[in-house]
Structures are given as C-alpha cells and as structure tokens.
Image: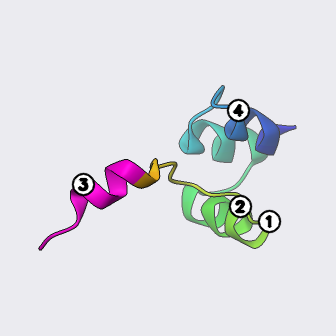
Amino acid sequence: MVKRLFEIGKLTVGQAAELAGYSKPTFIELLGKLGVPVIDYPPQELEEEKIT
C-alpha cells in the first residue's frame, strides 16, 4: 500500500518511509530491490542535464 502511494505520487519518499516504519535510506534500498524508481526524470530532461 505504501509503495503504491509513493509510486503514484501521493507520498514523498520520506513520508512513505516513515509510514512504512523504515529509515529513508532503507526504504530507498527496498524500492530499488522491487524495481521501483526513486527519481522520476523524463528522458528529455536527463539529456538536457548532460555536461558536454
């Protein structure tokens, strides 16, 4: 439930971690193991951020 609320943007990663009873770093690690991206950057923005 908490993971889904984070995925749809209803909770920040910090809020979701707190609600789930984890530290923020631990929650981020768990999301990674579940294949849930923590940072949602559109590909175009990533391309614009590249340092040439």
Label 4 CA crowd tier, 10 Å (few <14, some 14–19, many 20+): few
The residue under the point 52% across, 48% down is 40
The residue under the point 44% across, 54% down is 43
Q: Tell me where residue 26 sits by quadrant.
A: bottom right
What residue sits right under mark 3 in the picture? 48
The residue under the point 74% across, 65% down is 35
Coordinates of residue 29 in the picture (x, y in percent): 65, 69
Report the Cα–Cα distance between label 4 and label 1. Answer: 15 Å
What residue sits right under mark 2 in the picture? 31
The image shows residue 37, relative to residue 18, as above or below, that is below
Single out the mark in the foreground, 2 or 3. 3
Say what secondary structure mark 2 lies in: helix
Contact, CB < 8 Å: mark 1 with mark 2?
yes
Compare residues 34 and 18 and report the one nearer the observer. Answer: 34
What residue sits right under mark 1 in the picture? 34
Report the Cα–Cα distance between label 4 and label 3. Answer: 25 Å
Chief secondary structure of the magenta portion:
helix
What residue sits right under mark 4 in the picture? 8
Report the Cα–Cα distance between label 1 and label 2. Answer: 5 Å
Apparent side of residue 47 relative to residue 2 in the rendered image (left or right): left
Contact, CB < 8 Å: mark 1 with mark 3?
no
The image shows residue 48, relative to residue 7, as above or below, that is below
Report the Cα–Cα distance between label 1 and label 3. Answer: 28 Å
Q: Tell me where residue 6 sits by quadrant.
A: top right
Coordinates of residue 50 in the picture (x, y in percent): 22, 66
Instruction: Compare marks 1 and 3 and give the one earlier in the sequence.
Output: 1
Say what secondary structure mark 4 lies in: loop
* Highlighted magenta segment, given as a residue range: 44-52
